[in-house]
Amino acid sequence: QVQVVESGGGLVQPGGSLRLSCVASGSIFMLNAMDWYRQAPGKERELVAQTFSSGQTNYADSAKGRFSISSISRDNAKTTMYLQMNSLKPEDTAVYYCNAVAMLTAGGYIHNYWGQGTQVTVSS
């Protein structure tokens, strides 16, 4: 199985910065992408940023110019990815979730593996 763990959330003032980390551990045959999603109270979960094994990245309009997603780094059974968030706004307040899009065995199916989330609160 794959375990995904996020960290780095917290309370920050508007205009501040945070760096979120995502670590996926387990036996992964192929990793297609890793994503950051967020969910604010009373709202649906939304995509923030994606990084693909090809090196390509994709951002939601709300994240463009302020957030930067790293490439995927693999070291044995641990895969790491980061989201640098700058110029944070109160509307960025949400639980941020990491998702790993992966295949565990050759010829197997691609699944999404989600972490438990990390809270980001932007407030003065």
Image (cartoon, rainbow, N blue to C red):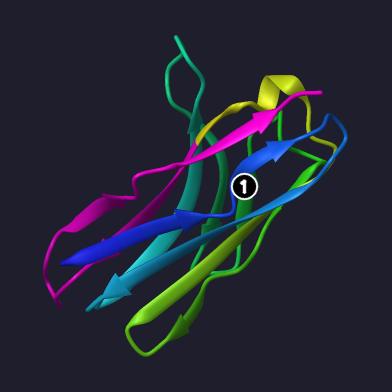
Instruction: Indicate left or right for 53 with 124 as reference.
Output: left
Q: Give x and y (percent) for residue 56.
A: 61, 61
Residue occupying the point 42% across, 17% down? 44
Q: Is residue 62 left or right of residue 55?
A: right
Q: Check disc 1 and give the amino acid type.
A: Asn
Residue 6 placed where, x, y %? 46, 55
Q: Is residue 108 magenta?
A: yes
Q: In the rendered image of this protein, does residue 94 appear above or below residue 31?
A: above
Which residue is painted at 63% across and 26% down in the image? 93
> Is 43 drawn above or below residue 33 in the view shown?
above
| Residue 53 x/y as whole percent | 48, 69
Q: Quadrant of the N terminus?
A: bottom left
Write down the region rendered in magenta: 96-124
Looking at this view, name the residue that lies furthest to the bottom. Answer: 76
Q: Quadrant of residue 77?
A: bottom left
| Number of numbered discs visible in the structure rendering | 1
Label 1 sits on residue: 58
Residue at 54%, 65% (x, y): give it. 81
Horizontal side, residue 100 vs residue 47: left or right = left
Q: Is residue 103 above or below residue 37?
A: below
